[in-house]
Amino acid sequence: MTYPLFVAGLLCCSAIWAQGPGPNSSVLDTRIEATRAAFGVPSVSVAIIQQGRASYARAFGDADLEKTEPATTSTRYAVGSISKQFTAASLLLEQEKGKISLNDKVGKYFPDLTRANEVTIRELLSHTSGYEDYAPQDYLIPEWTRPTTPDAILDRWAKKPLNFDPGTQWQYSNTNYVLAGKILEKVSGTPLLTFLNENFFQPLGMSSAGDCEVKSPADAKAYTRYALGPPRPVGREANGWYFAAGELCMTPSDLAKWDLAFLQKRILSPKSYEEFTREVKLKDGKPTHYALGLEIGDIRGTPTISHGGEVSGFLAMNTLFPSKGDGIVILTNEDGVNLIGPLTQEIANTLLDPENASAEKQDQQVRAILEGLQEGHLDRTLFTDNANSYFDDVALADYRRSLAPMGKLEVLSRLRSQGRGGMTHLSYRAHFQKNTVLLNIYVMPDGKFEQFLVGEQF
């Protein structure tokens, strides 16, 4: 569990959605399908932007397992909390029109809510308000199967005592965005979905984007997983539960159209864009790593703007690399399985370092070493004297006994590569049939391994 020149600028975007030069499609196809199969997810659909152009769109697996209905690039998925950035952008657009200020107090619009004259709209959008989250669970609870309304949610959760004083802590809360959406509707005089359609979806040509409550034959079926079991059909939340916090469904390609406009700064004015993407600090100056409906981070040292999404039966991840004009959209139709994180990392490695053949060779070498350790043997010519002293008979026996029961090594994902101590420090996630582990590795300038440690993933 996201002005006239503006519209004219967006209308040109649909022509940009054409396959351009990008990453090696056959290599990506193989890696994505192998990752999907390893995690056992019914389907995954991916769209990639590279250097400001759409370069890849593919779907893998089945949108409906019972009907054996293949997923296609036209299959719609719930994007969950990725919806929040559309709500934030909408309020910024209204601020540009002079109808609202993000520094306005909530009390200006909903005076009956808890400490409404202390909480600002900006604090809602940055999760620093203190309003308690009404939907923290990661599974479908009985209450969510009964219809509700945004007003009922606010009446119950936004009238509780705050979890903390406004601006003093960061705590994710869907309640913030339900309230933000209601404020948008009051200020604009337009229902939320109508506003999004008129200002974003139609101008961008996002024909699949809309309310998940309005079902479409193109919708993927929702699945969940109990522990490490197989995919099981799961129900969806009833009408009214997600609203401005997570109500949207769309294809990855349509979300990528939004991303292209975002990367090219055509969604909002430069001032609003800066406000949209600037990390919000707490009152004591501590970082939150969050802007307005957007997470601020990095992958392999490259700055990212991203957000994930989760609703019953669906997980999603949208990651942008503004300095490179790149983006990755990953949508899946099973919750309870963390496919989106490792797959985003896997694709990011290809985008951020597409020409590094030596890294590919090194990854293959790491895989071969790990598979050898499963069998209790080691090519000692690949290791330094220090590492060879570490891998004595006892160590090799323990590695074999603990790794062999995990079964086949299915997916090996490089997480990080950085310099330290005159060496290259590598970290990997290794996904076996029955378990997942982390690798902590140091490589000397001559290519020999100074360290090769296997540890649990927590």
Image (tube, rainbow, N blue to C red):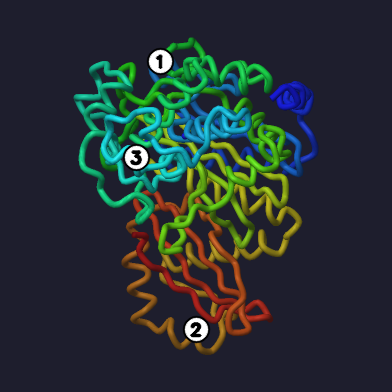
Would you say the residues marked 2 and 3 are in contact, meaning their CB atoms lie under 8 Å apart? no
Mark 2 → mark 1, Cα distance in angstroms: 57 Å
Of circles 2 and 3, the one toward us is: 3
* Label 2: which secondary element: helix
Q: Quadrant of residue 352?
A: bottom right
Q: Which residue is mark 3?
A: 117
Residue 219: x %, y % from top left: 47, 17
Q: Give the percent coordinates (x, y) of residue 239.
A: 33, 16
Residue depicted at 37% across the width and 36% down the height: 176
| N-terminal-most mark, 3 or 1 | 3
Q: Nearer the viewer, residue 362 or 119?
A: 119
The reply, left or right, for residue 272 in relation to residue 193 is right
From the viewer's side, name the closer residue of 390 and 244. 244
Q: Residue at x 64, y 35 (%)?
A: 259
Amino acid at circle 3 = Asn
Q: What is the three-letter code of the residue carrying label 1?
A: Glu
- Residue at label 2? 387
Residue 89: quarter of image: top right
Q: Secondary structure at mark 3?
A: loop
Secondary structure under the numbered disc 1 in the rendered image: loop
Front residue of 6 and 15: 6
